[in-house]
Image (cartoon, rainbow, N blue to C red):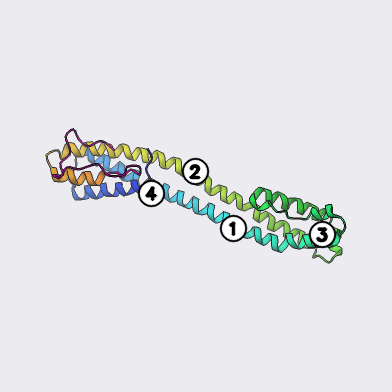
Amino acid sequence: MAIRSSVLLKVVQLILDFFAAHPEMSPGLTAALAKLRTLGETLRGLTTTTQAGTARSQKGAERFLDQQQQLKFIFLQPLASLARSAYRGFPKRIAEFRIGKLTDDSREGFLTRCDAIQLALVANLADFLALGMDPAVPDQFAVALAELRALPAEVNGGRLARKQARGDIDRTADQLMAVIHQLDGLVRLKYRDDVATLAAWQVARHIPWANRATAPDTPATGAAPAGGTPAT
């Protein structure tokens, strides 16, 4: 079952705090603790990458919507108005410059429609210039469209980074769990006659699984129940 990386990082920190308070360690504990610390730092870095990918995707999506509205207001709507003037009485010609009602539902659909309008503008440029349109408009429109087209790549790039980090997070979390199990066995053997230390360890290494409504029952004395504590 999966565990959130933020929860696992808290457990790692509690374990590190436990060993800071109990520095007497065997070589095996020392090596396992060093591995835990390294994997914890790796997981922290991957979590940051995931968060950055999410923020990048969200920022790209917001920028796309903002620039989409600007493109409509600055270029598409004025060109549609000029087309209605130039081709009055010819609805099919006017329709070549119409934005459409459903393009907002799809980035690709909107960009495809913009490409068609751009081609129609170039093919009929003389008609628009005759109405007094600035000759620089086609190039300006092309630049604005290219900038808009680059934004979905930014969104997808953020999603890809997040997906790759997610796979690495799962692998690192699995390795961390193995080390925590290793430490659990070593600590419980080392402090098998020290009830207070074992109780402190049980608190430190406890993993609050999301689908467990309550934590395992702990005897009032703080001692481990007969047969040992079920491994998490």
Question: What's under tag 3, amino acid-wise?
Answer: Ala
Where does the image place residue 175, in percent across and percent down from the top left? 35, 38
Q: Give the foreground label among 3 and 2.
A: 3
- Which image quarter: residue 69? bottom right
Where does the image place residue 160, in percent across and percent down from the top left? 53, 45
Secondary structure at numbered mark 1? helix
Question: What's under tag 1, amino acid-wise?
Answer: Arg
Upstream in the sequence, badge 3 or badge 2? 3
Mark 3 highlights which residue? Answer: 83
On screen, residue 49 versus residue 123, left or right, reads left
Upstream in the sequence, badge 4 or badge 1? 4
Q: CA distance from mark 4 to mark 1?
A: 29 Å
What segment is highlighted magenta in the picture? 206-232
Tell me, yes or no, whether the highlighted magenta stretch contains residue 100.
no
Upstream in the sequence, badge 1 or badge 2? 1
Q: Are marks 3 and 1 in contact (CB under 8 Å)?
A: no
Question: What's under tag 2, amino acid-wise?
Answer: Lys
Mark 4 highlights which residue? Answer: 44
In the rendered image, the residue lying farthest to the front is 213
Secondary structure at numbered mark 2? helix
Mark 2 highlights which residue? Answer: 163
